Image: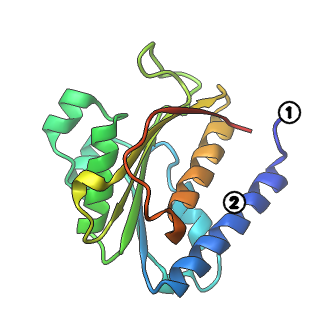
């Protein structure tokens, strides 16, 4: 059974509050580059009063053209790997850092459904990237997550929470990872 909207909102707000407090304590700013979440991560952060000292920028780049024009994702990456790929998420995170004053950026791109999936890229596949300013780009964290749901709201909520968690300072040691599967409650 899916959590009710009020429970989802509480979980989101609690995590966003923690992300802001922990990054504030670390003296750093955050940026988010979103596709399938359509601004949900940015909204979670900016719904918290006082977020402006930590939240630097949110890029909602739903189309390939937006990814290119706002985040400098190359047409070669999009044509070769597609919009839902490790390479695209990596480039989105890199672009969010380059186009903001943030110290950390997280990118999210995926297939929230209910349609649009394929055998290679099914509904529920979300790709994340996390980049720190000054970090070797080869060490940016990237991960494909298959959320085990076909419910659009559940997938977008789960992706939002996953992305918020990636913004926590205690995740700085993360490096590129293997694919995982998670429930999308």
Residue 46 lies left or right of residue 78; in this view the side is right
Label 2–label 1 contact, CB within 8 A: no
**Where 18 falls versus 88 (above or below)?**
below
Q: Earlier in the sequence, mark 2 or mark 1?
A: 1
* Image quadrant occupied by the C terminus: top right
Based on the displayed image, in which of its 4 quarters is residue 136 positioned? bottom left
Which residue occupies the foreground of this view, 39 or 119? 119
Q: Secondary structure at mark 1?
A: loop
The percent position of residue 172, horizontal first and vertical second, equals: 44, 65
Based on the displayed image, in which of its 4 quarters is residue 6 positioned? bottom right
The residue sitting at 61% across, 81% down in the picture is 21
Residue position marked by numbered label 2 in the rendering: 12
Query: How many numbered marks are there?
Result: 2
* Image quadrant occupied by the N terminus: top right
Based on the displayed image, in which of its 4 quarters is residue 173 positioned? bottom left
Residue position marked by numbered label 1 in the rendering: 1
The answer for how far apart the CA atoms under marks 2 and 1 are is 18 Å
Query: Is residue 154 in sight in this rendering?
Result: yes
The percent position of residue 58, horizontal first and vertical second, equals: 42, 65
What is the crowding at mark 2: few (fewer than 14 residues within 10 Å), some, or many (at least 20)?
A: many
The residue sitting at 47% across, 32% down in the picture is 179
């Amino acid at each position: 059974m899916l959590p009710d909207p009020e429970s989802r909102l509480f979980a989101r707000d609690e995590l966003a509050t923690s992300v802001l407090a922990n990054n504030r304590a670390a003296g750093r700013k955050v940026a988010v580059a979103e596709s399938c979440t359509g601004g949900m991560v940015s909204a979670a952060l900016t719904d918290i009063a006082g977020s402006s000292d930590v939240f630097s920028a949110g890029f909602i780049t739903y189309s390939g053209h937006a990814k290119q024009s706002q985040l400098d994702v190359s047409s070669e990456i999009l044509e070769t790997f597609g919009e839902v790929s490790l390479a695209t998420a990596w480039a989105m995170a890199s672009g969010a850092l380059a186009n903001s004053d943030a110290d950390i950026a997280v990118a999210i791109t995926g297939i929230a459904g209910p349609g649009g999936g394929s055998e290679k890229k099914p509904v529920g596949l979300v790709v994340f990237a996390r980049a720190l300013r000054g970090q070797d780009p080869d060490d940016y964290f990237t991960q494909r997550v298959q959320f085990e749901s076909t419910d659009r709201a559940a997938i977008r909520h789960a992706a939002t929470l996953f992305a918020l968690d990636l913004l926590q300072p205690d995740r700085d040691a993360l490096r590129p990872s293997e694919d995982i599967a998670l429930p999308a409650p």
